[in-house]
Amino acid sequence: MSRAIGIDLGSSSSCVSIWRNGQAEPVINDWGNTVTPSYVSFTDKGRLFGDAAKYRASIHPSNTIYNFKSLLGRKFSDSKVQSLISQLPYQVVDRGGIPSIRVDYRGERKEYIPQEIVAMLLLRLKELAELEQGTEVSQAVIAVPSFFTFVQREAVRDAAQIAGLHTLKIVNEATAAAVHHLISNGVLGQGQKNIIVLDFGAASLDTSVIVMDERALEVKATTSNPKLGGTHFDDVLVAHFASMFKSLHQKDIYGYPRALQRLRHACERAKTRLSFASQIPLEVDTLVEGDGLYSIMTQTRFEDLCGKLFEQVAPSVERALSGANLNPRQIHEVVITGGSSRIPAIKSLVKRIFDGKTPSIVDPDCSVANGAATLAAILTSPANVESRRFNEYARLDIAPHGLGVATSGGLMTTIVPRFAQIPIESFVDFTTVQDFQPSIVIRLYEGEHSQAKDNLFLGRLVLLLGHPQPRGFPRIRIAFTVDSAQIVVTANLIGTEESTTLTSTGGG
Ligand SMILES: Nc1ncnc2c1ncn2[C@@H]1O[C@H](COP(=O)(O)OP(=O)(O)OP(=O)(O)O)[C@@H](O)[C@H]1O
């Protein structure tokens, strides 16, 4: 028998949940934890995952891979990839325009694209679930940040396929957490309710705004702030202690990858402990050439240092609310989740933004995977009355970004707006700008920038225009058909059979 699982593919840690006895539950890994660090380490003898791999990061930084989710579905030349590479202790090289991770494995030099590394982690999570439930697993619902483009979602599907998993659905992280919260508390369909879910993760703050009443539940907006996550708080602490170390010992820790890795781990540990203590010691022995670091950090100082980052919470919430045409007073329930939601300053900040409304805190580590497992159970039992009712009731998929084409002057003309409910079919009619054009090249983009070139290039279509006509005469219809699995774009010369189609798999 094959059962479907739910996976939270996190930047810093991942979680897999199964559906058992009518509820979702996270699988405990071989270290006794529900979360598995998103780390893969390559050694002479084999591969290590999770805690075992993370433990090796400071001993073998160049062979221990983490933060790979940020490389998924991006080009090597992407400025985000370039800036990430400059901070990573392992090697990332250009393989035909795709970032490729270079490691030494079993005595050989190997290169893996990000999908292959993600697949190794997904396979590990699949095996954990198989061991737990004693059955083979071949399907999954996978949660990703809402800023993931269609191309990145497609890359996740590819990785799952390599791991032997068919992706039933790609869902936004905050939406998955909302599904878990609403279903496990039995509040679906209980009158009009506007809910905002804030998922404070490692790499981003993900937000979903959900409106529900007796008849329907709709995700109205999902936004992401990729500059506001736990790793950004770690960066601030690392910078603080690196500068302290430099003034004490005149040595720049950033020039020593192993020392930097050890300091980073110490800072993350300090940050997590500061959520429960007013001050903690930070001690790292023999960091660089025998010199160590011994200091203390208080919760107040940590909040001061991260003040600029905390200031981004309110605008991020505003962006999500304005995408849903709501204001904070119209929100009935605020839900917070994700590892960084444990930070006391974040809880107080959210409370202040929503006029003193106390946020509901749902399992910071597993609510996303539990929501994904709940959806997996629903999708694999379509005949079940409850599943049918949920499928008719809930509209969870929205376009993460606008989709459109480049028009004259390189401007982006959006055909499917951001946050449009999907599945959707939408078209715009265009004409030519030059006399007697034999064909037209249509460039497709995803994103919100007004200049098409600043958005993500998805592909191009070439449409033959039959017998040449003066500019403004040919009428060309460009239609997007988008569902949670793919984008199909068709260009048709109206009144003729002439048409061309491009299909891109991905998901909303
Ligand atoms: N007690 C704590 N106090 C502060 N931060 C914490 C605490 N526990 C965990 N974190 C932080 O939470 C982050 C991990 O959260 P989570 O597992 O939700 O993110 P993720 O799923 O790995 O990342 P993302 O969702 O951004 O892809 C890490 O940065 C971790 O340091």
Image: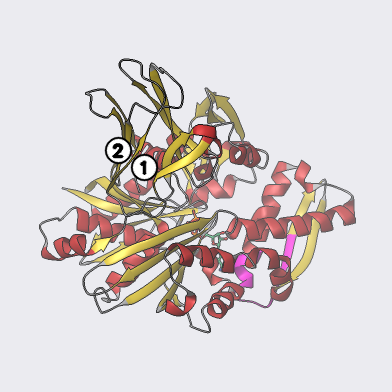
Residue 74, image x, y percentages: 51, 36
Residue 274 lies in the magenta stretch = yes
- Distance from Cα at disc 2 to Cα at disc 1: 7 Å
In the figure, is residue 257 to the left or right of 40? right
Give me the residue at 21% from left, 71% from top: 215
Asked if residue 373 shows in the view, the reply is yes
Q: Is residue 24 above or below residue 426?
A: below
Q: Nearer the viewer, residue 235 or 51?
A: 235
Within 10 Å of disc 2 (Cα), the crowding (few <14, some 14-19, many 20+) is some
Q: Amino acid at mark 2?
A: Gly
- Which residue range is magenta in the image? 270-283
Q: Are marks 2 and 1 in contact (CB under 8 Å)?
A: yes
In the figure, is residue 331 to the left or right of 302? left
Residue 149 lies in the magenta stretch = no
Q: Is residue 367 above or below residue 476?
A: below
Mark 2 lies on a secondary structure that is loop
Write down the residue under mark 2: 164
